[in-house]
Image (cartoon, rainbow, N blue to C red):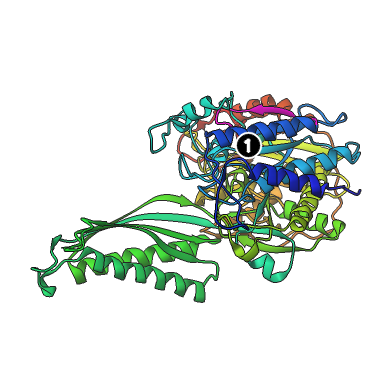
């Protein structure tokens, strides 16, 4: 169906939001704004967004960290159905631009309005939502992605609210002061899918003259804190051969990091980068030989292995400097965000939407972190880009043309409609809990009779309750992964070397277990590959009772589930979890922890 995007309203929303927290500049073409989390400008931006949400008929809620959710439930859609959600953030860096974040929020709002008013509710099987995450930039509290990290369970709620800014003001107090500390916690695992529209912050789309980018992978980011300690001494009285100059040693380290990153980019991965971006010299006097230097190192790539290669090279550089320059060194790694692959079928939906709207799309990766990284670890997620003029971002000269904003929103709207209309009445659903080698896996399975294809979300949880995503032990998921399924968006399809026997869950799991024993695996990413199943196999979907399956050290319990969404069948999943026992140890051990948080 045709979706009518109101490009004038979208542009008006972006410009009106850009006036909130505006900062004067001498450049007539610049548009600067400073919108820090918990500030008056942030309050004004939130107030305007909620007003616009209510204007188009969305119900609005705010959680304990200020995440805003606007929802629309079509008449024919169950109130218990999981929503398809889109959005981004409204906060900014100091003197930032007007598009970074707000394009994604107001683009999502316009996309949902277009679907809502386009008489598409007859085809929808899921509600739609618009989200504004709190403190994505990390300009005042935390290291960024704060709202989405709480919504994904990566951060503790109470600890997050207790975080303070440079003036000692707590995050909770800042939210309360502007009236945006709500209740509860937004839970991204309850979403059927997530789309984020953002400006590219690079020149790939501009160079290719393509209005919309579809992100394949969001880069991993590692940050290291390095200290080099020498001996402070008088700059005039200390001879050149008697010095232990920490800054001179640091200069060699900086060049070593640059060389290592350049070598990896030339020989292994052209998306790898390494930067020493901060430097503190002590005592910092012109007439004193530097005694100590602290540095911040930023290393990124869409694959994990190149990041490790550069980190190893940095450690080797420090070891050499200790010998050659007689300095002491330390290196810690306080921040390590792994690369995240976006959902293949949501990316397909975006390309399909672009084709239907007559808008060209282009695959590319993201070199910057986004809220989608946190969401993708719990549900299907996609990230779309609109071009940035000259690749400028976090700058008053940040600019994306109105036509590009509108085209990207058209693709977003079509993607949302496609995703929220995917499953029809001919869908069967099962939930499963599998315990393998001490890791309990919970999965939601949906299979369409018309296509015979499945879509699932599987989470891994260790027996002590700690989650394990994209780690080595996720290889256990091969017992419940199936063709074209993704595990937390990071595991490639498991391919069965024989026809898919989808006559029952029992036969299905048996074949997948056999395939899993002959799998090959990329240790760095948890990817599992093999050979594709043959097409044309007859498939039927009979009714069945709860089925318990035992494959060596693996026990699985499958439960038929009612239609209507995750909330209605949580209790059945929990009950099945109580019947799941791991037999991978010398003694039996019952894993009965609540499975609801990871079943999808």
Q: Quadrant of residue 276?
A: bottom left
Question: In front: 174, or 584?
Answer: 174
Q: Magenta part mainly helix, strand or loop?
A: loop
Count the marks. Answer: 1
Q: Position of residue 195 (x, y in %)?
A: 70, 47
Q: Residues within 10 Å of mark 1 (few under 14, many from 20)?
A: many
Q: Quadrant of residue 396?
A: bottom right
Res 424 visible: yes
In the rendered structure, the answer to whether residue 446 lies left or right of residue 493 reads right
Res 565 visible: no
Which segment is the magenta one? 57-66
Q: Is residue 383 magenta?
A: no
Q: Position of residue 30 (x, y in %)?
A: 60, 56
What residue sits right under mark 1 in the picture?
45
In the rendered structure, the answer to whether residue 309 lies left or right of residue 533 reads left
> From what the image shows, is residue 590 above or below residue 142?
above
Question: In front: 146, or 271?
Answer: 146
At 47% from the left and 26% from the top, the residue drawn is: 173
Q: Is residue 58 magenta?
A: yes
Q: Position of residue 599 (x, y in %)?
A: 64, 36
In the rendered structure, the answer to whether residue 456 lies left or right of residue 39 reads right
At 84% from the left and 60% from the top, the residue drawn is: 355
């Amino acid at each position: 169906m045709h979706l009518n995007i109101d490009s004038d309203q979208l542009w008006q929303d972006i410009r009106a939001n850009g006036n909130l927290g505006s900062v004067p500049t001498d450049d007539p073409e610049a548009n600067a704004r400073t919108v820090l989390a918990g500030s008056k400008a942030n309050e004004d931006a939130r107030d305007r967004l909620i007003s616009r949400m209510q204007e188009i008929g969305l119900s609005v809620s705010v959680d304990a960290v200020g995440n805003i959710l606007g929802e629309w439930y079509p008449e024919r859609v169950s109130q218990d159905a999981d929503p398809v959600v889109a959005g981004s953030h409204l906060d900014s860096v100091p003197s930032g631009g007007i598009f970074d974040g707000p394009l994604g929020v107001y683009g999502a709002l316009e996309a949902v309005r277009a679907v809502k008013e386009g008489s598409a509710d007859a085809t929808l099987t899921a509600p739609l939502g618009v989200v504004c995450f709190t403190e994505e930039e990390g300009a005042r509290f935390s290291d960024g992605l704060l709202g989405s990290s709480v919504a994904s369970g990566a951060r503790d709620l109470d600890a997050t609210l207790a975080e303070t800014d440079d003036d000692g003001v707590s995050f909770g107090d800042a939210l309360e002061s502007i009236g945006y500390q709500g209740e509860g916690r937004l839970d991204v695992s309850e979403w059927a899918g997530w789309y984020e529209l953002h400006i590219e912050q690079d020149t790939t789309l501009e160079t290719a003259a393509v209005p919309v980018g579809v992100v394949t992978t969001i880069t991993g980011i590692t940050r290291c804190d390095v200290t080099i300690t020498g001996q402070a001494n008088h700059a005039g009285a200390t001879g050149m051969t008697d010095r232990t100059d920490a800054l001179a040693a640091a200069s060699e380290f900086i060049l070593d990091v640059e060389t290592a990153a350049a070598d990896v980019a030339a020989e292994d991965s052209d998306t790898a980068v390494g930067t020493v971006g901060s430097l503190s010299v002590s005592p910092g006097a012109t007439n004193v030989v530097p005694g100590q230097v602290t540095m911040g190192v930023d290393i990124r790539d869409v694959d994990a292995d190149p990041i490790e290669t550069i980190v190893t090279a940095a450690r080797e550089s420090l070891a050499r400097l200790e010998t050659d320059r007689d300095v002491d060194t330390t290196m810690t790694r306080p921040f390590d965000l792994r690369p995240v692959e976006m959902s293949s079928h949501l990316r397909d939906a975006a390309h399909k939407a672009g084709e239907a709207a007559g808008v060209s799309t282009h695959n590319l990766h993201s070199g910057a972190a986004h809220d989608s990284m946190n969401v993708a670890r719990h549900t299907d997620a996609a990230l779309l880009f609109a071009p940035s003029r000259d690749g400028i971002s976090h700058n008053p000269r940040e600019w994306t043309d109105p036509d590009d904003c509108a085209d990207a929103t058209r693709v977003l709207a079509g993607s949302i409609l496609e995703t929220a209309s995917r499953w029809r009445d001919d869908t069967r659903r099962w939930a499963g809990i599998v315990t393998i080698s001490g890791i309990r896996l919970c999965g939601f399975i949906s299979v369409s009779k018309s296509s015979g294809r499945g879509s699932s979300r599987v989470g891994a949880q260790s027996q002590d309750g700690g989650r394990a995503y994209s780690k080595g032990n996720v290889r256990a998921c091969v017992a419940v992964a199936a063709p074209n399924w993704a595990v937390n968006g990071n595991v490639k399809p498991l391919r069965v070397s024989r026809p898919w026997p989808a006559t029952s869950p029992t036969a299905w799991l048996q074949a997948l277990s056999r395939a899993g024993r002959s799998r090959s695996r990329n240790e760095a990413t948890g990817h599992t590959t093999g050979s594709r199943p043959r097409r044309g196999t007859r498939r039927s979907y009979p009714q069945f009772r709860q089925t318990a399956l035992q494959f060596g050290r693996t026990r699985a319990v499958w439960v038929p589930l009612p239609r209507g969404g995750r909330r209605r069948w949580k209790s059945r999943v929990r009950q099945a979890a109580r019947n799941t026992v791991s037999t991978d140890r010398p003694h039996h051990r019952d894993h009965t922890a609540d499975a609801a948080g990871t079943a999808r």
